[in-house]
Amino acid sequence: MRVLGLVGSPRKGGNTDLLVSRILDGAGASKHLTEKVHLYALNISPCVDCRSCQKGKLQCAVEDDMQMLYQKLEDADVIIFGTPLYWYGPTGKMKLLMDRLRPFVASRKLNGKKAIIVVPSEEGAGACDCLVRMFELSFEYLDIALIDKMLVKAYEKAEVKERPETLNCAFEIGKKLK
């Protein structure tokens, strides 16, 4: 099984990065192939609503790093979407990625994939309702099964390092993947 971790935080080594990494560590311990991608290291342009993805080859016409990500998404069996909570939604890079998933509606190449969401936030799970709902609706539209979510109260950089129980929970999420 291939597990792709998408880190939608600008902070390398921050809470989102650490939690996604621990889930990938758990998946690796179960002999799954893992890969982590930092979205802020990539050039991801906004959707320009040209609708190329709805006709012909069903591909996005925008040339940027999403072309590489499209293949990684297709190859993955499980996709981890990690983003800190920004104003009750995802970070800008994660939202850009979500907007650019439109080619998969017509091509159906993500149908049957599994997803996990990881969301650290200042206030914890209760503040994440809008963001969780955005992911749920998007996954439903793309026929992706949301199999787990990790909503964690964590705001200061890398504060989850001081919480072994939280890191262990993330590890177990990855370890139990089937």
Image: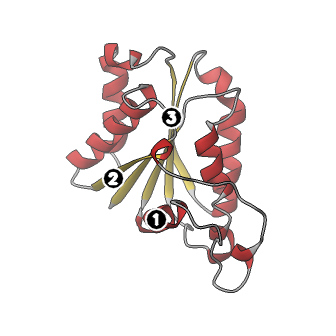
Which residue lies at the image location 68% right of the left edge and 34% below the top edge?
A: 89
Which quadrant is the C terminus positioned in?
A: bottom left
Instruction: State the image coordinates of residue 169 (x, y, percent, origin top left).
Output: 36, 29
Query: Mark 1 belongs to which amino acid?
Result: Met
* Residue 175 seen in this snapshot: no
Q: CA distance from mark 1 to mark 3?
A: 19 Å
Task: Count the marks.
Answer: 3
The residue wearing badge 3 is 9
Query: Mark 3 belongs to which amino acid?
Result: Ser
Instruction: State the image coordinates of residue 154 (x, y, percent, origin top left).
Output: 49, 17
Instruction: Bin the neighbour count of mark 3 within 10 Å (Cα to Cα): few under 14, some 14-19, many 20 and up.
Output: many
The residue wearing badge 1 is 68
The residue wearing badge 2 is 35
Left or right position of 40 against 128: left
Which residue lies at the image location 28% right of the left edge and 41% below the top edge?
A: 26
Q: Quadrant of residue 175?
A: top left
Which quadrant is the N terminus positioned in?
A: bottom left
Q: Earlier in the sequence, mark 2 or mark 3?
A: 3
